[in-house]
C-alpha cells in the first residue's frame, strides 16, 4: 500500500530525509522496459508526467529504434519500502565518450522522470544530488550526463531533476491555453486577426475546390498520411538546409507503430490531423494526448504555390477548434521558435539542460557542451544572428547539396 503524504513526511522527520532518505532508496538499473511494466504503470498514474513518459510511448520508441540502430536503455528505478519513488527513463549513447541521455532524444519536447507525488517533499536538492552520486557509481566508465529539454515543473509540481546544475536550453516550448472554449482561446491572442485570416483561407480553398479536416482512423488512412508527412517534412528540411531527424527507417516505423494502437482511444499516443484542399493533403500535424492535453510531436506542409497561403496555420486553427470541442485544456505546440507559435501560444515555457560530468576526464568536454548550448541560445535570441544562420543554411542547401 502506498504511503500517504503524512506518512512520507513523518518518515522524513524521523531521519529519513535528504541524504539519509536518498541512501535508503533501493536502486536498480534495467536494460529494458518490460520487466518493470507494473511499476511503471503504477508510477505514471500518480506522477506529473507528459505523454512522452507514458509506458506505451517509451516502449514503442525502444522497440522501433532497436532494430535499426540499437540503443542501450539505462532505466533507473528507485524504491522505498517496496514503493516506487522514481523512474528515470535514461539510455546510454556515445562510442568513445559515453553519456546518459533521456530515451527519445530530439523527438521528445518535454523530458522528465516519473516522480510519484507522495515522495515529492523528500526530493530535495541534497537528496537528488545524493541519488545521482549513487547512479554515477553504478556506471563505471561513463563520461557525462546530458539531460536536455526539461521544464521547471509540470502540473503544479517542481521538477526534481533540476536540483542538478542546469542552464537554459536554446529551445523554449510554446503552449496554448484552451480553457473556456474556442472563442475564449482565440480572444487571448488577437481573435479578430485569426478569424479574418481563416475566412480568407477558406475562400481561397473553396475557389480551389474546397477543404477538409482529416483525422484518420483506419490503418490504411494512417499509413497514407504518415507517408505524406515524411515526404513533406523531408522536402521542406532539405530546402531549408536543416538536418532531417525523421529520415531514419526506425523513426518511420516508430511513428507508424505509435499511431496504430491509438485508433478510437480516449488518450491516443498519436493522433494525426491533415488538411486536404482540392483533393490534396497540404499540411499534417501529429500529437499525443494525456490529461486533456494534446502535445504536438511534428508538423509538415507541402512546399508549393499553396505554401504562401499558410496551410499549416489553417490546419492549426481547425485543430484548436477540434481540441476545444473535445474538452482539452491545453495544446503544446512544441519547442522551437517559429512565427506561428509566437502568434498562437499563450505561454512560453523556458526549458533547461542538465549537463554534468560523471568522471574527471570528461570535465573539459562537458564545459564545451555547456558553452556550445549557451552560444546556440544566444544566436536563437538574437534576430540578426539567427537570420544570418538561416540564410547560411539556405545557401548551403542551394549551392552545396
Image: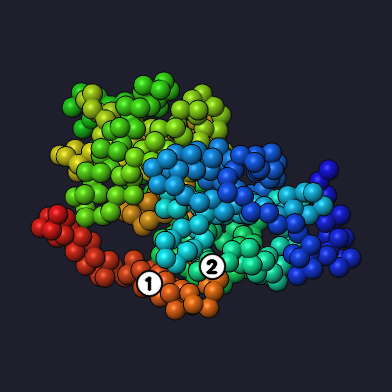
SS for dot 1:
helix
Q: Quadrant of the N terminus?
A: top right
Residue 184 visible, this orientation: no
Q: Quadrant of residue 192?
A: top left
Q: Is residue 9 left or right of residue 37?
A: right
Residue 41's x, y, as percent?
66, 39
Direction from residue 231 to residue 343 in the image, left or right: right
Cα distance between the residues tagged 2 and 1: 24 Å
Protein image colouring: rainbow
Measured along the vertical axis of the image, is residue 107 above or below residue 261? below
Q: Determine which residue is flagged by label 2.
A: 141
In terms of image quadrants, where is residue 120?
A: bottom right
The quadrant of the rendering that contains the C terminus is bottom left
Viewer-closest of 85 and 97: 97
Badge 1: few (under 14), some or many (20 or more) residues near its Cα, within 10 Å? Answer: few
Can residue 14 be seen here? yes
Nearest the camera: 69 or 259? 69
Left-right relation of 88 to 81 = left
Neighbour tally class for label 2: few under 14, some 14-19, many 20 plus, Cα within 10 Å: few
Position of residue 358 measured from the top left corner of the image (x, y, whole percent): 55, 71
- The label shown at residue 372 is 1
**Rendered location of residue 353, percent (x, y):** 49, 65
Q: Earlier in the sequence, mark 2 or mark 1?
A: 2
Residue at (54% x, 27% y) in the render: 265
The image shows residue 397 at horizontal and vertical percentages of 16, 55
What residue is at 69 percent from the left and 69 percent from the top? 130
State the SS at label 2: loop
- Name which residue lies at 52% across and 61% down: 100
- In depth, the one of 185 and 333 nearer the eye is 333
Amino acid at each position: 500500500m502506498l504511503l500517504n503524504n503524512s506518512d512520507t513526511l513523518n518518515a522524513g522527520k524521523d531521519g529519513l530525509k535528504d541524504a539519509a532518505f536518498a541512501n535508503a532508496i533501493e536502486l536498480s538499473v534495467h536494460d529494458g522496459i518490460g520487466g518493470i511494466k507494473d511499476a511503471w504503470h503504477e508510477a505514471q498514474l500518480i506522477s506529473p508526467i507528459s505523454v512522452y513518459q507514458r509506458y506505451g510511448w517509451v516502449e514503442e520508441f525502444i522497440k522501433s529504434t532497436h532494430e535499426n540502430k540499437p540503443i542501450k536503455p539505462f532505466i533507473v528505478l528507485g524504491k522505498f519500502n517496496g514503493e516506487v519513488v522514481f523512474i528515470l527513463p535514461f539510455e546510454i549513447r556515445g562510442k568513445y565518450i559515453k553519456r546518459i541521455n533521456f530515451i527519445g532524444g530530439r523527438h521528445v519536447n518535454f523530458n522528465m522522470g516519473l516522480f510519484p507525488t507522495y515522495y515529492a517533499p523528500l526530493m530535495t536538492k541534497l537528496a537528488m544530488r545524493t541519488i545521482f552520486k549513487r547512479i554515477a557509481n553504478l556506471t563505471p566508465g561513463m563520461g557525462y550526463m546530458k539531460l536536455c529539454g526539461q521544464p521547471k515543473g509540470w502540473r503544479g509540481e517542481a521538477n526534481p531533476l533540476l536540483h542538478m546544475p542546469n542552464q537554459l536550453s536554446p529551445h523554449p516550448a510554446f503552449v496554448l491555453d484552451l480553457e473556456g472554449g474556442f472563442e475564449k482561446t482565440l480572444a487571448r491572442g488577437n481573435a479578430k486577426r485569426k478569424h479574418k485570416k481563416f475566412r480568407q483561407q477558406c475562400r481561397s480553398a473553396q475557389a480551389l475546390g474546397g477543404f477538409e479536416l482529416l483525422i484518420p482512423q483506419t490503418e490504411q488512412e494512417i499509413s497514407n498520411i504518415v507517408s505524406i508527412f515524411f515526404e513533406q517534412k523531408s522536402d521542406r528540411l532539405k530546402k531549408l538546409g536543416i538536418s532531417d531527424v525523421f529520415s531514419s527507417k526506425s523513426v518511420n516505423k516508430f511513428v507508424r507503430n505509435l499511431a496504430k494502437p491509438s485508433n478510437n482511444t480516449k488518450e491516443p499516443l498519436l493522433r494525426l490531423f491533415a488538411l486536404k484542399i482540392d483533393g490534396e493533403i497540404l499540411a499534417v500535424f501529429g500529437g499525443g494526448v494525456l490529461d486533456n492535453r494534446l502535445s504536438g510531436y511534428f508538423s509538415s506542409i507541402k512546399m508549393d504555390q499553396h505554401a504562401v497561403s499558410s496551410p499549416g496555420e489553417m490546419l492549426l486553427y481547425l485543430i484548436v477548434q477540434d481540441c476545444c470541442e473535445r474538452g482539452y485544456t491545453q495544446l503544446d505546440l512544441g519547442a522551437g521558435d517559429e512565427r506561428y507559435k509566437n502568434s498562437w501560444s499563450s505561454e512560453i515555457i523556458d526549458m533547461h539542460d542538465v549537463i554534468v560530468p560523471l568522471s574527471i576526464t570528461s570535465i573539459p568536454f562537458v564545459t564545451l557542451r555547456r558553452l556550445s548550448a549557451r552560444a546556440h541560445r544566444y544566436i536563437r535570441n538574437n534576430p540578426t544572428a539567427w537570420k544570418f544562420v538561416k540564410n547560411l543554411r539556405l545557401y548551403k542547401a542551394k549551392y552545396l547539396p
